[in-house]
Amino acid sequence: MKLYCKGMIRMNKKIDLLELVKECERITNIKLEVPLLINKRLKKSLGITRYTIIKQGRQSKIKPKSIELNDRFLKTATKEEVKEVIRHEYAHYCALKQVGRHNHTDYIFKLWCKRLGVSNKATMEVKGLQSNKEKYTAYCVHCNKRVGGCKTSRHNLVKKTNLFKTKCCYAPVRILQNY
């Protein structure tokens, strides 16, 4: 099992990802044979199990390709949150290895989640990470209250900020870009 990352991983806490994966291997008795990647492009997903479809005549076989974790999530998450995501993605991996299916409603996937002690739900509440659909957020300059937001820089709220006043204090708007 290899841990790949382009560039340096900076985490606010020391979290040993390889140790968490080895713990999953001990529980499931299935060795991770694909790389564990740190993906800087993931925006909404905390982790993802990638796979390839191999055509064999009329039938096709699904083979796991990699497990990827969100770089921003790793920088802000607690050890328990990282453990939960790694175990969830490992359950996807185990289901793929066993039967070639891994969706959240699949019975085999649910059994692997139960064995690993994690939820089979596709979503997880994380405090430090915002999966904002809004790229820009508007705040009142006077009371610092959030008053709006938009998805693109082409929006008038971003282009013509000086035209907008807040309802709370009738003060100018300050725009912050969400990363």
Image (cartoon, rainbow, N blue to C red):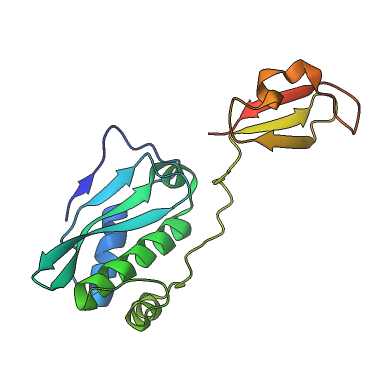
Q: Tell me: residue 59, above or below residue 5.
A: below
Q: Residue 149: which quarter of the image?
A: top right
Q: Is residue 142 left or right of residue 14?
A: right
Q: Residue 40: which quarter of the image?
A: top left
Q: Is residue 121 left or right of residue 111?
A: right
Q: Is residue 95 left or right of residue 82?
A: left
Please give the name of the residue rendered at 65% of the width and 27% of the height, measured from the top-left corner. Answer: 155
Q: In the rendering, at what x and y percent does residue 177 appear?
A: 60, 28
Residue nearer the viewer, 131 or 38: 131
On the question of residue 16 being in view, the answer is no
Q: Tell me: residue 11, above or below residue 107.
A: above
Please give the name of the residue rendered at 46% of the width and 60% of the height, measured from the top-left corner. Answer: 80
Q: Tell me: residue 94, above or below residue 148.
A: below
Q: In the rendering, at what x and y percent does residue 63 appear?
A: 18, 65
Q: In the rendering, at what x and y percent does residue 117 appear?
A: 41, 75
Please give the name of the residue rendered at 71% of the width and 26% of the height, measured from the top-left corner. Answer: 157
Q: In the rendering, at what x and y percent does residue 105 appear?
A: 42, 77
Residue nearer the viewer, 119 or 106: 106
Total numbered labels placed on residues in the image: 0
Quarter that holds the N terminus: bottom left
